[in-house]
Image (cartoon, helix red, strand yellow):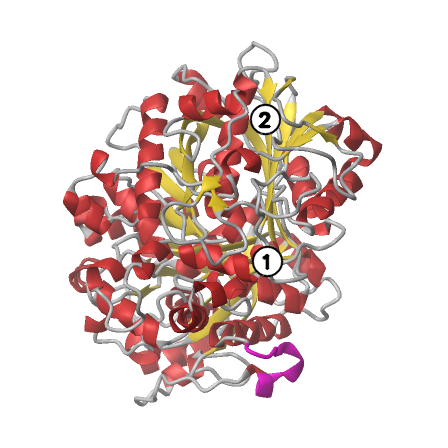
Amino acid sequence: MKPLQIAVTGIGIISSIGRNKQEVFENMKQNQTGIDSIQSFDVSMFISKIGAEIKGYDPSEHFTPEEQQSLDRCAQYAIISIQEALEEANLQREHNKTIGLAFGTCNGGLNSLEHQKTLSNLDSHLTKNYPFFQQGDAVAKYFNLNGPVKTLNSACVASGNAIGFACDMLQHGYADVMIAGGSDSMSPSVYAGFNALKALNEKPCSPYSHHYGLSLGEGAAFLVLEPLEKAVARKAKIYSVIIGYGLSSDAYHETAPEPEGKGILRAVKMAVAQGGVDKERIGYINTHGTGTKANDPAELKGLQSFFGEQFYDIYVSSSKAYFGHNLGAAAAIEYATTLLALEKGLLPATIHFEKAREGCENAKLVTNEMQVHSPEYFLCNNSAFGGHNVSILSKNVFHSPQTPNLDGDSETTKQSDVVVCGFGTVHALANKSGKVLLSLINYSSQTTQLEFSLKEYKKDLYERRMNPLTQYSIGACDLALKNSLKSNDWSEDIGLVYGTSRGSLKSAEKYLGSILERGFENASGVYFPDMVLNSTAGKIAKKFRLKGFSSSHSSGGTDGIYAMLYGTTAIKSGKQQIILVGAGDEASDLSKEIDRALLLSESTYETAEGSTFLMLADEEIAKEQGLDIYAKVKGFGMSSNLENDIYQTIQKCVSQCLSDANLTLSEIDFILYHNNNVFDTEAFLQLKTDMGNIPIYTLNDMCGYMESNGSLFHTQVAVELLSLSEQKQKEVTRSLGWTRDRLNTGLILATSINGNCIAMAISK
């Protein structure tokens, strides 16, 4: 596995115990908590009346009236913390420096929807701020970032997932600097959901202590990340060196952890394997530790399984008693505050602690006061609804005074080539085996209205009240597995990367509708778990026992290729040998309201539903296992909207992709472009003009516009084309009117609603 050498050179934070990192750390040292009576909404009807709010927050101190209108509270918190991190990092913004953003969130812009107290005839200005990807895109625009921009929606591991993704972007050369972290604001709808699950504590939470329950919080923390050698060369202050991270799925339950902690165990094993250090050198673990009855002992069991008897000599604590459970921002806030403590030779404590609950008695807990200790290496772990887990392994640079070792502690390994070994689509134009090319060739104005029932397709995969997005995605995943693996005996060794811009808005309608109809105190505990966008990925993992590398994200139109990118970098890094990548979309009344707010309703393309999955594998493993190889992934390019010029953004994206793939433009035989035909129409026309005789097509006039899945649908078509024999290719290209009979290499392009772009090159 290829090790990481990523330096943390800037930290920014805003939370219930401080508006900046100095305030936060000083309050931690004084054993202060931000958990107090909720002030921002009525909690009289709930089990608990407390939470960790940012008190006295006034957006006018930070933003103009116009900015306040265009930024949800989630994005506002992020901007404040990023500003602090960037000022500390003291980056020189050279013209050619690529800076990207990995943004983690659990709630996205939910406040902007809640304020309206209705789900129909919505205010477009507010509704535009709701989609999860809008938070990351708005922040990237605010700071004029030009690199990869991706929102991780994997619930309470989202910001840890974001840190991991950012590390991959740096390791594989897609950015010079990445800003990574997460943000979430307090939400009455989310508070009501945890109340419905009876997960809240009447007292300030104290993980591992005998009083059960969590305390919700809000805030943001972001890190400036850069390759270690560059940080050392510019003599930047370095807080830590990230050397490995792991992601996994419990594949067990929508809200409860696997009781033996096997999911967090797999994430820790992956992180430590990538870091290449002996586990005996790890001296501290900042745990997820929510305070709930199920989470705390399960997490400790998983850690004990990995470390054995050594576990009882490792200091362990959960920081949530300081500032509550910050959901999508939790991992970043807990990692950032761990670094602040380590800088002073201290470990964060679990405050409010009285006595250990059953199953937590033997851990070496840091309780009530910070512990003087300086571990050589440390772990920060988090878990989430949907079964996602993350573990980040870092080197404590304050353990010894010398400059961090540029060589790392592990040897580098040869990067793997990544191939496509299977595919499947659920869509109005797909056949029963999940293929779409033939329908497109014979296209004659068919409807894009999808009629698919997972219960009728395969009854044992269906569950009562399963939303359409999950049904489509499980169906497509099953087709991809059928078309690739000879058996399902090794599904536990397969990873999953899933893209969805909006999640299931039908489920959101039912949950939020339950509040509008019956009040917050009667919020539906049945539909609340589906409010997190990673719930679909969690259900897919559970159905197919996919327990490996696992992530879920949003990007507003580029989701499918971003899934391809993250799956590819995970395989190239040696984290996983086989990964399923997928994306999906469903239609709903709320989705139509969002389309109107984003102006997608003005597109000439019909809105469509569906899901596509592709199986990616290490080429050597694919050959060893006798898997069919349909295409090879060659390279990627990404760029956020440069100076509001989409065509310039596309040009940079294509140039980076060709360089990454070691190709020239003359070697590209065709381009398939997933566009929205609202903001990128002129760019599409200019692209067709400038590319000369290279055929450039969008399939959206036939298949309809699928925000999340469209780019992956285009990818499957390209894979089907490339896998044809030369004679079959000639027949297809002539029927399409293309000038090239033989197709060896294609380029897939996608632009988001906010003008961000991603490109991918694949070959025969």
Q: Counting residues from the N terminus, which is met first, the one under dot 2 or under dot 1?
A: 1
For badge 1, the amino acid type reads Lys
- In the drawing, does residue 611 fall left or right of residue 707? right
| Residue 457 magenta-highlighted | yes
Is residue 224 rendered to the left or right of residue 594? right
50 vs 681, nearest the viewer: 50
Provide residue 117's location: percent of width, then percent of height.
Answer: 31, 65
The answer to whether residue 639 of the structure is visible from this angle is: no
Above or below: residue 670 compared with residue 71: below
- Please state the horizontal and vertical placement of residue 3, each as a whole percent of the image: 59, 34
Give the residues drawn in magenta, as a range: 455-465
| Residue where numbered disc 1 is placed | 198
| Real-space Cα separation, disc 2 to disc 1, in angstroms | 28 Å
Position of residue 146 measured from the top left corner of the image (x, y, whole percent): 29, 41
Residue 348, numbered circle: 2
Residue lying at 69% horizontally and 47% vertically, measured from the top left = 266
Percent coordinates x, y for residue 272 in the rendering: 67, 36
Q: Give the number of the disc on residue 680.
A: none
